[in-house]
Image (cartoon, helix red, strand yellow):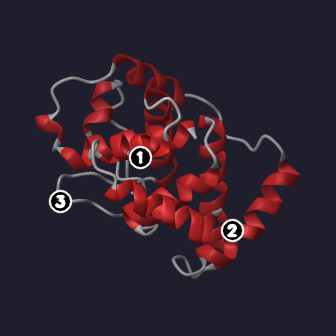
Amino acid sequence: MIRKALFTLLLSVFSAAASAQVKEVDPQLLVALKGAVTEADSFADRFDAEVWLMSKSQPLARYIKDPERRMHVLKAIHREATRAGLQPEIVLAVIQIESAFDPYAVSRVGAQGMMQVMPFWKNEIGRPEDNLINMETNLRYGCTILKHYIKKAKGNMPNALAYYNGSYGRHTYSRKVLDAWADRWR
């Protein structure tokens, strides 16, 4: 849930305005992002992760045809979601709505990658060399941001998703993500 909020926060900030338009960055989010980009990646429970990977492979086949690539993407999503304390399924739903699993997606306001992360975050946390088109980097940023917004919204997922998308006060985006979660990923 927390990872979803951070992802929603990031997407909302990125979708709402171009990086030049962002005036103030939440200091707690900066600390979370700085910590996230330096932590190691691993599954907490290998057996559970393998069961999860197999159950999510079929719905993801619609977006990623190659089975090896699909497993690589699922492992990365599971790893980053788990690291951030999010349900991997909500991250899958966010990615479905944000980029349809296109790691090269770039929005009209400059948000990049599967989770549509705004490039200004790299400079905010002192890592201008990070590549947001890199799937693992994008997932690390996006999941951390989503988690932050879930905390900010006190667990209210529609509000957290709206923060993430930059559409707080409206829940059109939130409904899309939650519908995708219920229909395909839960």
Q: Residues within 10 Å of mark 3 (few under 14, many from 20)?
A: few
Alpha carbon separation for disc pair 2 and 3: 30 Å
Amino acid type for the residue under numbered disc 3: Arg
Q: In which quadrant of the rendered image does the N terminus lie?
A: top right
Residue underneath mark 3: 108
* Residue farthest right in this picture: 47
Q: Residue at x 35, y 17 (%)?
A: 27
Location of residue 79 with respect to 107 vertically, above or below:
above
Task: Determine the image quadrant of residue 100.
Answer: bottom left
In this figure, which residue is indicated by the disc labeled 1? 161
Q: Where is the C terminus found, in terms of image quarters?
A: bottom right
Q: Secondary structure at mark 1?
A: helix
State yes or no: discs 1 and 3 in contact (Cβ < 8 Å): no
- Assess disc 2: are there few (<14), some (14-19) or many (≥20) residues with their C-alpha within 10 Å of its C-alpha: some
Residue 174 relative to residue 111: left or right: right
Give the mark nearest the N terminus, 2 or 1: 2
Can residue 19 be seen from the camera position used here?
A: yes
Residue 118 visible in the current orientation:
no
Q: Is residue 175 left or right of residue 73?
A: left
Give x and y (percent) for residue 18.
16, 44
What residue is rendered at 66% in x and 51% in y?
Answer: 78
Disc nearer the start of the sequence (1/3): 3
Mark 3 falls on what kind of element?
Answer: loop
Please name the residue that numbered disc 2 is placed on. Answer: 56
Q: Which badge, 2 or 3, comes first in the chain's sequence?
A: 2
Camera-side mark, 1 or 3: 1
